[in-house]
Amino acid sequence: MAFQGNFSCNTLRSGLANGTINFATDTFRLALYTNAATLDQNTTAYTTADEASGGNYAPGGLVITATVGTESASSGSIVFINFSSPAWTGVITARGALIYKAGANGAVCVLDFGANKTSTNTFTVTMPANTSTSALIRLV
């Protein structure tokens, strides 16, 4: 099994620190992968290796929209980032996904679905609520 949990990628942390990842202006994509893919926190960029196929899925996945929010807390501000939920039609099987900034060295996070997921009509990656306690990325 290549997927072993959900990870924010090291390139996300360095990209936020050096300004190469900007959730307000950059284009992000979500690509689907089979169980044979090796993706983890050390993943730096999108790869076609072991990418899912089928239905109307095309290499590179779909563009997703990032939404940034902030909330005040007793310990300071919490910044949270979430994405739109992409969907494809047709029969598709995937074990996980990679959210990445379009272009080089822009891996944001790896999503492990926990098991192979197969669609017969529509394959949707449903994102959590965009709140300080649920969003995919939370910076405290």
Image (spheres, rainbow, N blue to C red):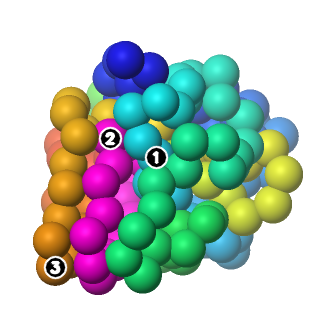
Report the disc number at residue 82.
none
Secondary structure state at the residue bearing disc 2: strand
**Residue drawn at the location 39% of the way across and 24% of the way down:** 3
Left or right of 4 on screen, residue 74: left
Q: Name the residue under label 3.
A: 121
What is the span of residues highlighted in magenta in the rendered image? 78-97
Secondary structure state at the residue bearing disc 3: loop
Left or right of 118 on screen, residue 22: right
Three-letter amino acid code at the position of disc 1: Tyr
Callout 1–callout 2 Cβ contact below 8 Å: yes
Three-letter amino acid code at the position of disc 2: Arg
- Picture quarter with the N terminus: top left
Residue 57 screen position, x and y as percent: 46, 73
- Picture quarter with the C terminus: top left
For the residues labelled 1 and 2, the Cα–Cα distance comes to 6 Å
Residue 112 screen position, x and y as percent: 32, 35
Residue 60: quarter of image: bottom right
